Image (cartoon, coloured by chain):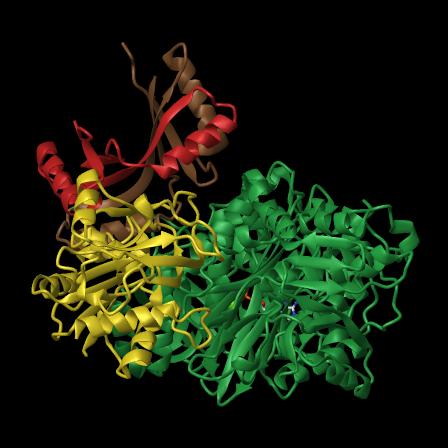
Chain colours: A green, B brown, C red, D yellow
Amino acid sequence: MLEYTGMRFANAEAMGLSYDEWLLILKRLDRTPNLCELGIFSAMWSEHCSYKSSKKWLKTLPTEGPQVIQGPGENAGVVDIGDGLATVFKIESHNHPSYIEPYQGAATGVGGILRDVFTMGARPIALLNALRFGEEDHEKTKHLVSGVTAGIGGYGNCIGIPTVGGEVNFHKSYNGNILVNAMAVGLAHADRIFYSAANGAGNPVIYVGAKTGRDGIHGATMASTEFSDETESKRPTVQVGDPFTGKLLMEACLELMAADAVLSIQDMGAAGLTSSSVEMASKGGLGMEIDLDLVPVRETQMSAYEIMLSESQERMLMVIDPEQAETARAIFDKWDLDFMPIGRVTDTQRLVLLKDGGVACDIPLAPLVDDAPEYDRPYRPNELQPVLTSASLICDFLVKDALIKLMSSADLASRRWIYEQYDSDVMADTLAASGGDAALVRVHGTNKALAISTDCTPRYVEADPFEGGAQAVAEAWRNICATGAKPLAITNNLNFGNPEKQDIMAQIVGAINGIGKACKVLDTPVVSGNVSLYNETDSMAIQPCPVIGMVGLIDEWETAVGIGFTSVGEAIFVIGQPADCADGWLGNSVFAKIVAGREGGAPPPVDLDAEKAHGQFVREQIAFGQIKAAHDISDGGLLVALAEMALSGNLGADINIPESDTLLAWAFGEDQARYLVQVEDAVKFQALLDEHNLKGHQIGTTKDSQILTVGPDVTISLEEIRQCYESKLPEMMA
Amino acid sequence: MEVKINISLKQGVLDPQGRAVESALISLGYSEANNVRIGKQITLEIEAEDASRAQQRAARMCETLLANTVIEDYSIEVADPS
Amino acid sequence: MEVKINISLKQGVLDPQGRAVESALISLGYSEANNVRIGKQITLEIEAEDASRAQQRAARMCETLLANTVIEDYSIEVADPS
Amino acid sequence: MRVAILVFPGSNCDRDMMVAVETITGRRPALVWHKDSQMDPVDLIILPGGFSFGDYLRCGALAARAPVVEAMLDHASRGGAVLGVCNGFQILLETGLLPGTLIRNERLKFVCRSVNLQLQPDHDSPLLSTLDPGHSLTIPIAHNEGNYFAQKDDLEMLKQNGQIAFKYTASPAFGPDNPNGATDDIAGILSANGRVLGMMPHPERAIGNGHPSSDGKLLLRAILQGVA
Ligand SMILES: Nc1ncnc2c1ncn2[C@@H]1O[C@H](COP(=O)(O)OP(=O)(O)O)[C@@H](O)[C@H]1O
Ligand SMILES: [Mg+2]
């Protein structure tokens, strides 16, 4: 019956499989695979689907805690937020497609991550992103920034989920390989989470959503190979997002779930029908039989191979309760979506595909999943970079000039040009969107809110993967704590170069170890994530970028604070820094890069115990109403954080400075675990700090002026800062 | 010279807009409508010595800006001034 | 029958997209470009006995849905099947 | 007070509007699906924001031909009150109930932020009569196609008849402002009888309670009072 078209190793190799992997397929099948079968193996065993290079290390991450309802392994992680509710979230990359076609690449990235979340039974309530582009004056940067921004907005705005935050960096290592990571956060009833494991042999398998075309065939394999000019011409048909159909699909699925008709459900993401059918069947310990002639297609003469590997968007696979089939169909009719029984669950533990009256594929499921190769790739870390002294980086720049230069750099300038293109208010529960530390989104109909942030500082990770990995978690932690919310858990997106190179593999190992350590100490388990490797162009690797997406919870959203100064004549405290401090960590800082013109050097060390103590203190004092505004100190250091608070609140301040030869380091050093806060009662607050044994002191006072006064000699008008801070991106993009 | 540039999605690329318009036409009673695709038509004037030169410049414009050649095809018509 | 419908903005109606494209072209060095206007081209198949009937139906579609006759003009071409 | 909110496939501010109206009236408005051609009589029909039918072809165009719109037009022709917000405004223009059209924002980009609106002192509408003439409101916008355009005689008519409801206006916080290039800074217009209002800004996103402004609540309350 089966057509043995005699695939050879050359075919397997062209699909990205190694010789050993090819031999393993022959052994498991006890025959040669046909084209469709080989395609299925290559997709399932691709880096993108199998995590073969990273799995060994991902297993070391902490994934448990009383708050965790579902950790990694499902479409998205699920975390308890009390009152019978749960938050469901995940982050995912769409790097390569976004480089090829920025608008559609970014749009489909958003669509894909949304499906991961509503597949679990959650209504998505917020989107964030983490973007990395090449140098600001690289010929492609403008085109990519505008396309990606429009694409993210194009999908999110239309489907009606607010885009509330994110981050953007520019660096030459991303000139030929941008990063587009999208995170979605949803809300569900804790006892009504839907999973992908198929159940009940004999139950119908239903295909819903958009029709299948020849889009993005073998995208999963594409995402697992290095980029070169050659791949640019070999590219598959670009996937086009259809947020309108995405919206209908989301509403229909949520309605269907509420009707109790769904037994298991899985979106068709990377590797489309292949990974969804294989994962559903194998997780359920069952098998599946699908008649490919029944799959709704929008093009003629699609082969089994093409149908199985198409990455057309807005599609889902589900197993439904046969008694509910008519209810289910009626719901999809209402939303004008295809609803097609295409097969059934079996107990054979095999994937059987029928086409044109014959068998197009008949393979055991176990090898696809269990035998997926897992590598223990050798790694050799680069030598750690030297600690750079302040003296070696300080130049004869005036504090004021340095501040202006930093605030108008692409690294620190306002991202308004980007985030004003995102509908951040739809759903009417957004309390704080882009522009502050973490976004705050109300848990609809309650007093609670979720605080959400995405963070990573790639230059730190490149210099020291372990510290950099830990720092990404620490910064996300600070952003959440600075709103008054309690951090709950993280998702992560590991963007690295080619893991077959030992130094890159060492970055991966180091960063995962750093993330793991930080998550343990800070009690923010990893509940979901995504790995994107081979981010290289013509062998130039990107700056490693393990993005952390953290979600926290605040019980009374009215107690939350923002970064902007709120009132005049109140004390400004720095937390996490002794009063006699006159220096700062300039190595590998934005100051070093922008003002001193020197990249590299050891990044600021991370002290997780200090992070924990300071974060908890800040959160508590916000809840008690002692803190009226809070901002973590990160890129650009203390003075940049201060300027951001002043701009946001539109109030000036007087700042005391130490007597110091290293004033620039004091002002712009990037030492970790620090916050700036505005408090009403300075004496009481100092006493609280002392009582908690925390370093911290008053450094200034808010003023009813539009001026920052820094020490006795320096005054800077907010207008001047605002002007350069706000005009940078619009000018760059003009 | 008057130049018309038609930009359409490549074969095989999903056209959600065309699909939505098609089903709207059908629900409005135009059941005879089929295979609706939506593209752009750009008209412009190009100062050039002759039609072939204008055609050439228009093609350059398409490649560098007007068309997204990853997903779109274009065709150019130069109105013969004679 | 293959039908092409071109929809363009009426004279006098502001075309922000056309203007933006024009200035982008000029800044890319295509100073010979002028008067850029952006319209739509809709292609579809219409089942009909003959070309004139297809033309008629297409015109109805434009009036009821495809064009916003407040600001847009349309023109219809039916590909001669012969 | 009976309020109905029309829901089209792709509407995405229907729930937000429902919550806002319920907050003000204490009564949950009915959500009416686009395929319904019959509708129970109501005092106010609201067309919410979103991307009905994906905004494909032209924004609002496909929704304007949906069955429920017939019922809405009936209601309006009997002098019933209608409010269209953002995409709802676009739909009202496509039905011809209001004159003109909304084209792409001048800067060709989606824009989401707060704007300042000035209620036009010479408006002639019972829906707005409880607000002070010249009242200024801070309300967010979020749209890609909010650039109001009308032919000269239509514009003239709007001015003559007091059919311009709101204009974008300068504010200390946001400076001189026209966020989308709209002709004469027009942000919202009225029908000749003053009972159909279309506007780009989203009052349902400014009802206090965590929103940066509560001016939307003020406005919606005025409309609900004006209808009654
Ligand atoms: N870096 C990571 N950390 C933790 N979990 C991860 C990571 N990368 C992937 N995972 C988990 O592995 C599973 C498979 O992820 P993925 O292949 O991205 O899913 P999808 O089917 O949506 O493409 C998911 O449960 C995901 O959360
Ligand atoms: Mg998934």
**In this view of the protein, can residue A104 be seen by the observer?**
yes
Q: Is residue A138 left or right of residue A363?
A: right
**In this view of the protein, can residue A381 be seen by the observer?**
no
Pick the front one: B7 or A363: B7
Pick the front one: A684 or A516: A684
Looking at the rendered image, the quarter that the C terminus of chain A falls into is top right
Looking at the rendered image, the quarter that the N terminus of chain A falls into is bottom left
Give the residue at x 27% y 56%. Answer: D120
- Measured as percent of width and height from the top left, residue D132 is found at 28, 66
- Measured as percent of width and height from the top left, residue A499 is found at 74, 56
Q: Is residue A403 above or below residue A529?
A: above
Displayed quadrant of residue A474: bottom right
Q: Is residue A143 left or right of residue C52?
A: right
Q: Is residue A434 left or right of residue A463?
A: left
Q: Is residue A102 above or below residue A553?
A: above
Give the residue at x 20% y 68%. Answer: D45
- Measured as percent of width and height from the top left, residue A151 is found at 47, 51
Pick the front one: A702 or A3: A702
Give the residue at x 52% y 23%. Answer: C29
Q: Is residue A726 left or right of residue D2?
A: right
Displayed quadrant of residue D26: bottom left
- Measured as percent of width and height from the top left, residue A78 is found at 55, 79
Q: Quadrant of ligand 1?
A: bottom right
Total count of labels: 0
Q: Is residue A357 above or below residue A571?
A: above
